[in-house]
Image (spheres, rainbow, N blue to C red):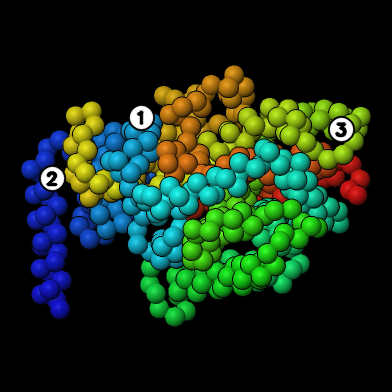
Amino acid sequence: MLFGFLLCLVTTILIYYFGVRRNPRLPPGTFGWCPILGQTLAFLIPHASTSVGDFLEYNIKRYGKIFRSHLFGYPTIVSCDAEFNMFVLRNEGHLFASGYPRNIPEVLGDLTLIHLTGETHKRLRGVALSFFATVKTESEHFLADIEAGALEIINSWKDKETLHFCDEARKFTFNVIVKQILSLRPNDHEATEILHKFHSFMEGLISMPVNFPGTPYAKAIKARLEIEDIARVLLHARRKVQTVDAERRTDFLDVLLTYEELSEEEIVSMVMGLLLGGYETTASLLAIIVKFLGDDPKALNELQEEHQKVLEKKKDEGGGLRWEDYQCMTFTQNVINEALRLGNVVKFVHRRTIQPIQYKGYEIPKGWKVLPVFTGVHMDSSLYLDPHQFNPWRWQNGDDGAGKRFMPFGGGKKHCPGWELAKIETAVFIHHLVLMYSWTPLMDTDVPISFPYLDFKHGLQISLKPLSPVS
């Protein structure tokens, strides 16, 4: 066994190190001292999500914005370069394909959109886009559901002086997404079960891929299968009904059932994927906005003034928020964009080359992994003035994040299909929050951390001060 390990080690060294020497046009960099582990552990060290972290900072200074490394078991090109990142994302399926480590599809399922490629990805993404297109065409219904969910959470705070905001944000986004996808209410048994299993799922999603009973990784796989079983039961029940309940509007499961060519496994996998996408990432976005605004009274004050104007307009019109109201929230959009840029909800994505790549004098072999790092672009001082400062006013001219520089939702064929819904949810929640409360983060050291998924170590505890009676 020892001989086999040493043989593997020596072979790996010969392949990688002599391969690099034979290709002097590779980007500069190093594979690290251990050819098997490479630099993965250093790359994954948690750091403030408002920074690139020590690993990237060191390598950018030494090698430049595009450099080679050895990550997640493969020789890898790491890019913090805006133009190259967009080149990678726009050439999905032609020069590059999804390159996530095997443990990701094992936890999420083989039919998850971030893992799929080719015609299957195109077909299933088209189904998702057809549903999210109704965000605008049926905006009245979406906004009503989101507003009701926001008020339910915020009104529950009336007797509280402090709370952990991350928990509240997750309650809100979960309640909204299960309503939109499965027409479930928060107290429904199925919703309660899904939420409980999601906790185990999220804990193991980014963990050591050890599929042994009791490990977080094994628990995550088990939780995903159990959530899919719940979705499958709901699917079978919906198929028996044949007609949509007149007391509820069409949800995503109804949309899926109109596509006769979809298999049951594809439907269940899409339900699972959109539950995940609409739950954790939007909650993280809300949390970083609350953190940044709590530390910036000037921005909070301007936001409150904007939403007070919306409220005064609604007094004359009556009713809930409408699409026109959402479009008037211009400074709110600036705050959302700046939080996405500075907070970096998604740090990077995984791609791999499917043919040899030539780019500005560099040659990248077929089969290498490529990591477009969005944080590296968003923190680039040559693109953003004072990039480590929360400054929503940088967006007021509408051009500071245009095109290649701003990629919070990815890009190309794998651009997040639910990005508009995420922004609407955030804006509606913020609308009611800033009109009803001011707040202060209780721990200056509780900052958003990249694990590499975004989270707050202490759950973002805040103190609340009501601005008006909560009813």
Q: Is residue 362 above or below residue 464?
A: above
**Mark 2 / mark 1, whichever is N-terminal:** 2
Residue type indicated by callout 3? Lys
Regarding residue 121, the answer to whether it shows in the image is yes
Local crowd size for mark 2, using a 10 Å CA cut-off: few (<14), some (14–19), many (≥20): some
- Vertical position of residue 263 compared to residue 365: above or below: below
Image-based side of 35 in relation to 164, left or right: left
Residue 12 lies in quadrant: bottom left
Is label 3 in contact with label 1 (beta carbons under 8 Å)?
A: no
Question: Residue 229 location, x and y as percent?
Answer: 56, 73
Find the residue positioned furthest to the bottom.
Answer: 213
Residue that appears at 74% across and 53% down:
249
Q: Position of residue 60 (x, y in %)?
A: 32, 36
Quarter of the rendering containing residue 36: bottom left
Per the image, label 2 sits on a secondary structure element best described as helix
Q: Is residue 429 something that shows in the picture?
A: no
Q: Is residue 92 above or below residue 382?
A: below
Closer to viewer: mark 3 or mark 1: 3
> Label 1: few (<14), some or many (≥20) within 10 Å?
few
Image quadrant in which the N terminus is located: bottom left
Q: Secondary structure at mark 3?
A: helix
Q: Nearer the viewer, mark 3 or mark 2?
A: 3
Q: Residue 420 at x, y = what percent?
A: 61, 40
The amino acid pointed to by label 2 is: Val
Q: Which residue is mark 2?
A: 20
Q: Where does residue 25 sit, x and y in percent of width and height?
A: 15, 35
Under tag 1, what secondary structure?
helix
Picture disc at residue 314: 3
Residue identifier under label 1 = 83
